[in-house]
Image: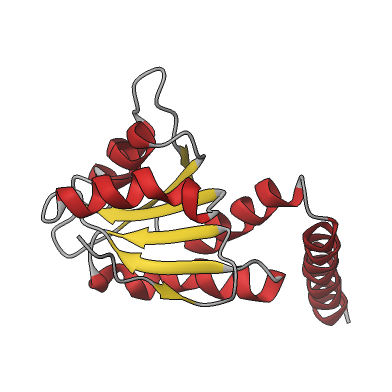
Amino acid sequence: MTLEIKIQMSQPKVAIIMGSKSDLNVMQDAADVLKELGVDYEITVVSAHRTPDRMFDYARAAAGRGIKVVIAGAGGAAHLPGMVASLTHLPVIGVPVKSSNSIDGWDSILSILQMPNGIPVATVALNAAKNAGILAAQMISIADETIVSNLIAFKEDLKNKVEASAKEMES
């Protein structure tokens, strides 16, 4: 089986996967923030239900390709993050996606959040792929001073935007 993976940069360290192409409108936020922070990533569709063999192959091969963190977005029953976490030693960040067949997103949130002991999945808020990207960058920054600097600058920019908003409102 050949996996088709869109590689955004030269040496991907983060894998962004989603259960369906329709999740891309949410998951693109993770890609955008990783790019902004200078973190190489790859992005593709891996469905736990429709392509289980692809999911097994992808999860088992990720570490060998140099991936350090997996961001997995899924809606509905949202099995993708947990199943991937069961197949790899890599940290997995789950992004619950409010999909067209979702119960206000609660089904996805609870499916990703309620993992059994031994198979942890870090879970961000509903549709919060940007936070998943930031968390992945923070994990990788442990061994990469450039990403540390980029994260510090990113957070300083957030602070400056809030302070500018406050000044604008107060005047």
Q: Quadrant of the C terminus?
A: bottom right
Q: Is residue 124 above or below residue 164?
A: above
What colouring method underlies this structural image? secondary structure
Q: Quadrant of residue 111?
A: top left
Locate residue 21, reporting x and y percent. Answer: 25, 72
Taking the spot 54% from the left edge, 58% from the top edge, the residue there is 14
Residue 125 visible here:
no
Task: Judge from the rendering whether residue 23 lies leftward or rightward of residue 40; answer left or right.
Answer: left
Q: Determine whether 149 is above or below 9 in the image.
A: above
Please state if 113 lies on the left or on the right of 160 as rendered.
left
Q: Residue at x 35, y 56 (%)?
A: 73
Number of numbered markers? 0
Where residue 68 appears, as percent x and y from the top left, is: 57, 49
Horizontal side of 37 relative to 5 (left or right) equals right
Name the image quarter holding residue 17: bottom left
Place of residue 49 in the rendered image (x, y in percent of width and height, measured from the top left):
13, 49
Quadrant occupied by the N terminus: bottom left
Residue at left offset 79%, top offset 76% = 165
Would residue 148 be visible to someone looking at this image?
yes
